[in-house]
Image (spheres, rainbow, N blue to C red):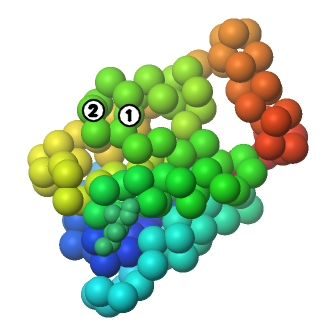
Amino acid sequence: MRIAVAADHGGFELKNQVVEWLRADGHDVLDLGAHTYDRLDDYPDYAFLVGEAVQRGDAERGIVLCGSGVGACIAANKLAGVRACLCHDTYTARQGVEHDDMNVLCLGARVVGVELARELVRAFVAARFQTEERFLRRRAKVLAREGAREGEG
Ligand code: RB5
């Protein structure tokens, strides 16, 4: 799977590990930065890079990290077609894809440990949207509200 990944300084180190894990698992990773640690960088810049990659179809999924994961999630969800969620349990990381077609996983690098982060990433990436009528109907309502069309993002 082609996956875009990015983080601000709060998620910088864990992001580099996420990129390594995904590549080791055979995924095609777009590492959109930060490429060097900068304590003054801003999470929206990285959340938008990932969200735009998903919007354009350059990546099927995205992962954004910041300190808490909250800022990254708020910013990513400003982009039409992006369905980002902060998931710190594996049930949500999986079910968010299966039921809600979540396409961007947000992680708080100051909140989760390395091993949990690895399991969260694996749960998110392994999950597939279940195209049952009720899930399609609910996603269509979300898309209608944001002005996106079915199939975008
Ligand atoms: C950066 O210090 C921190 O505020 C940011 O990474 C994130 O936690 C915001 O939600």
Please indicate, yes or no, whether residue 121 appears anywhere in the rendered image.
yes
Is label 1 in a helix, a strand or a loop? helix
Q: Residue at x 29, y 86 (%)?
A: 39
Amino acid carrying label 1: it is: Ala
In this view, 86 is above or below 145: below
Callout 2: few (<14), some (14-19), or many (20+) C-alpha neighbours within 10 Å? Answer: some
Q: Is residue 127 left or right of residue 37?
A: right
Disc 1 marks which residue? 93
Q: Are marks 1 and 2 in contact (CB under 8 Å)?
A: yes
* Residue that sits furthest to the top in the current view: 133
Disc 2 marks which residue? 89
Q: Is residue 34 left or right of residue 68?
A: right
Q: Position of residue 82 (x, y in %)?
A: 65, 49
Callout 1: few (<14), some (14-19), or many (20+) C-alpha neighbours within 10 Å? Answer: many
Q: Residue at x 38, y 34 (%)?
A: 93
Q: CA distance from mark 1 to mark 2?
A: 6 Å
Q: Nearer the viewer, residue 50 or 25?
A: 50
Amino acid carrying label 2: it is: Asp
In this view, 110 is above or below 41: above
Q: In the drawing, what numbered circle is on residue 30?
A: none
Q: Quadrant of ligand 1?
A: bottom left
Q: Residue at x 53, y 54 (%)?
A: 74
